[in-house]
Amino acid sequence: MPKDYKTLAKRSWQITQVSYWLLVFVLVLNTVVLPSCNRDSNAVILGVQLFLLLVFLPGMLKQNIRSYIWLTLVLLGFFMAAVSTAFACTSVFTVAEVLLIVSLFTAAMLYIRWRSRELKQAVTELEK
């Protein structure tokens, strides 16, 4: 029974987009608008974080698999920083940041897998 990888890829792409934009929103809130743990707002840190995320946006919107692969690699660094921050100073935004990074990473990995299989299945059908 063939699997409908197109639907699976579309759903994971949608979850990836929602998680991505929510993560950007939470980063802005946690870094500049409402910094927690007696920290000052820091636009430089936010700029670096947003640059690292926004550099992948054009490829993500084009549904380029390599952009998602690189995004997942960068998200590992975000995860390490977010977890250490969440353990040092737990707040709603730090926990939300960790959860959104995990959600984005998982959805992006599933998108990579299912989109690759969808494309492979399309090539196989063309060869027949």
Image (cartoon, grey):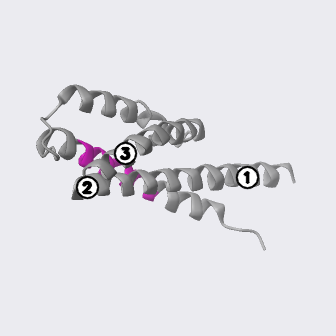
The foreground one among 76 and 111 is 76
- Of marks 1 and 2, which one's residue comes earlier in the chain? 2
- Residue labelled with disc 2: 90
- Of marks 3 and 2, which one's residue comes earlier in the chain? 3
Kindly identify the amino acid type of the residue bearing the numbered disc 3. Answer: Ser
- Residue labelled with disc 3: 84
| Left or right: 77, with 95 as reference point | right
Kindly identify the amino acid type of the residue bearing the numbered disc 2. Answer: Thr
Q: Position of residue 6 (x, y in %)?
A: 61, 60
User: Number of callouts in the render?
Assistant: 3
Residue 116 against residue 60 in the figure, above or below: below
User: Residues in magenta?
Assistant: 14-27
Number of the front mark, 3 or 1: 3
Toward which corner of the image does residue 5 lie, by quadrant?
bottom right
- Residue labelled with disc 1: 122
The foreground one among 120 and 18 is 18
| Left or right: 77, with 126 as reference point | left
Mark 3 → mark 2, Cα distance in angstroms: 10 Å
- Of marks 3 and 1, which one's residue comes earlier in the chain? 3
Element type where label 3 sits in the image: helix
Question: Is residue 128 rendered magenta in the image?
Answer: no
Taking the view exactly as shown, the residue that stands out farthest to the front is 88
- Residue ID at (71%, 54%): 117
Density class for disc 3 (Cα within 10 Å; few <14, some 14-19, many ≥20) is: few
Density class for disc 1 (Cα within 10 Å; few <14, some 14-19, many ≥20) is: few
Q: Position of residue 101 (x, y in %)?
A: 41, 50
Q: Position of residue 49 (x, y in %)?
A: 32, 33
| Left or right: 46, with 98 as reference point | left
Q: Quadrant of the C terminus?
A: bottom right
